Amino acid sequence: MSLDSSADVPAGGAGGADRPVGSGSDVSAAEVVGDPWRSGVSLDSSADVPAGGAGGADRPVDFGSDASAAHVAHALRDGGRPSHRSGGASGPDAGPAGGQAGTRHAAISWQAARAVAARAGQRGAVRTEWLGLGAALGRVLGEALTALTDLPSFDTSAMDGWAVAGPGPWRIQDGGGILAGHGVPAPPADGEAVRIATGARIPAEVTAVIRSEHAQADEAKGMLYAQRSVSQGQDIRPRGQECRSGEILLPPGTVVTPAVLGLAAAAGYDELPVRARPRIDVLVLGDELLTAGLPHDGLIRDALGPMIGPWVHALGAEVTPPQRLGDDAEALWKALTDSGADLIVTTGGTAAGPVDHVHRVLGRIGAELLVDGVAVRPGHPMLLARLPSDGPWLVGLPGNPLAAVSGLLTLAGPLLGGLAGRTPDDPYLAAVRDDVHGHPHDTRLVPVVHRAAGEPGTAGGAEHVVPLHYNGPAMLRGIAAADGLAVVEPGGVRSGTEVEILDLPWASATPWTEGCFT
């Protein structure tokens, strides 16, 4: 039985047939074939590139998952045309996109799009701020954590017991003993013993510490006897045992956990250098959106405005209140050119409809388009751009709610991870309980919920994920109950197959962080 479900999954977003061409390398579409906004080259996969070479015939070129940027560019320069093996139906150009009417980029693979976004974030300028230890929890180190002192900074006792000098038995020194936090104690004479507390400074001439339970004190004679053999330096923590001053303790990009705070304090820090949170502007587009009340007269509630800000905040960003611009190209142009954010997230307007202005406004501004369409369902018409003069990044999300979630996980998450300086987590796999239908050509992202081994509903089996219903591009009911999304390759998967799982920011966060990239 085929698991392809082209009838159940729309073949294309608003504005035209689906024609993905996956380069498979972590490069942008513009890097693959040059910048079409400047060259005027159409990247519509249905367009015939002028034939070249001997015979002058068109030569289909397979831009499969292993294709390199050089391979793709070479194929186009030599007169090849993209193969439609992974591209779906061909069709007329879907309308204006980018800087010129009729210019359209080829959709790239989901894996390549995520790699482009992550690399873009890693290339961003690093902004570091110093925060007190109490405010740095969950942030990411912007610089290496270097020891400001030896640890320990002097020889200390590892145990409560007796500090002894020379071989035993030892005469017990008069006095109250040596306590932690006190000044430099007087050294005992050879053959003497003095009481000492854990963490107390070791006096000069002391050869070992004998634990209280391993020693016998004869108070009447004033003598101390060891019940076990005593070795030179036992139960003494020597200065610099853990680190020396100037030694690198943790690299940049380390998440500040409670343990990191403890290490930093021990190493002499009052403040920590951490990556500044990326600043995010959210622009909600669409004249049909209501901010309150029930839908009526063709108007619907805005589901993305309340969702996008908290979502990217959970990814470690500082978010301004959403700006609702309607379908106004001039208002969009002004919001983009006036923004002082590190990243702008737009909702809707990324397809090629009569009021989808994002491409045209980006072209007018002269933005660099890195990703223009991704071979993923839902969320095909998402995009990633960089405004001129090292301006903000822009992630353009589709207007359908679950498609927008797909864009957040595909582009915004990896980009913000790079900006935060965090090393991406290794992908992890989980088996799906049921058959999952796939798109014929594109990756699908399907909401799932984890079930642990032995948990109700697992029938005593191993840990796995259960695909959830209500996973259409306009639906949020499934994702609201999910704790992850399964990455389903084209063609679908059988029950029991292991698939990559994308955690949702709140599902993967530890209790003391605000999210994945804080």
Image (tube, rainbow, N blue to C red):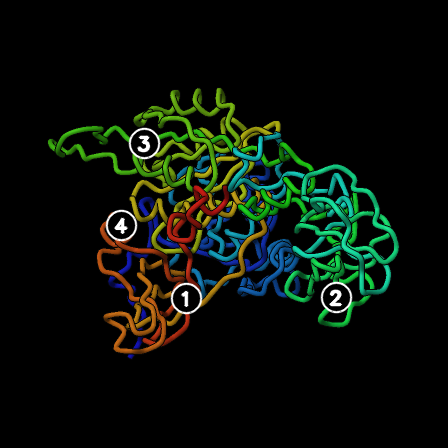
Query: The N terminus lies in which quarter of the figure?
Result: bottom left
Of badges 4 and 2, the one in the foreground is 2
Query: Which comes sooner in the sequence, label 3 or label 4?
Result: 3
Is residue 60 at all visible to an observer of this figure? no
Badge 3 marks a residue whose secondary structure is loop
Query: Which comes sooner in the sequence, label 1 or label 4?
Result: 4
User: CA gap, disc 2 to disc 3?
Assistant: 91 Å
Q: Is 219 in front, or is 224?
A: 219
Query: Which comes sooner in the sequence, label 2 or label 1?
Result: 2
Q: Residue 355 shows which numbered tag? A: 3
What residue sits 78% from the left and 45% below the top? 154
Q: Residue furthest front?
A: 220
Look at mark 2 in the image and give the residue it sits on.
Answer: 225
Query: Which comes sooner in the sequence, label 1 or label 3?
Result: 3
What residue sits 60% from the left and 57% below the top? 72
Look at mark 1 in the image and give the residue it sits on.
Answer: 489
Relative side of 133 to 87, left or right: right
User: CA gap, disc 1 to disc 3?
Assistant: 33 Å
Query: Which comes sooner in the sequence, label 4 or label 2?
Result: 2
- Amino acid type for the residue under numbered disc 1: Glu
Look at mark 4 in the image and give the residue it sits on.
Answer: 480
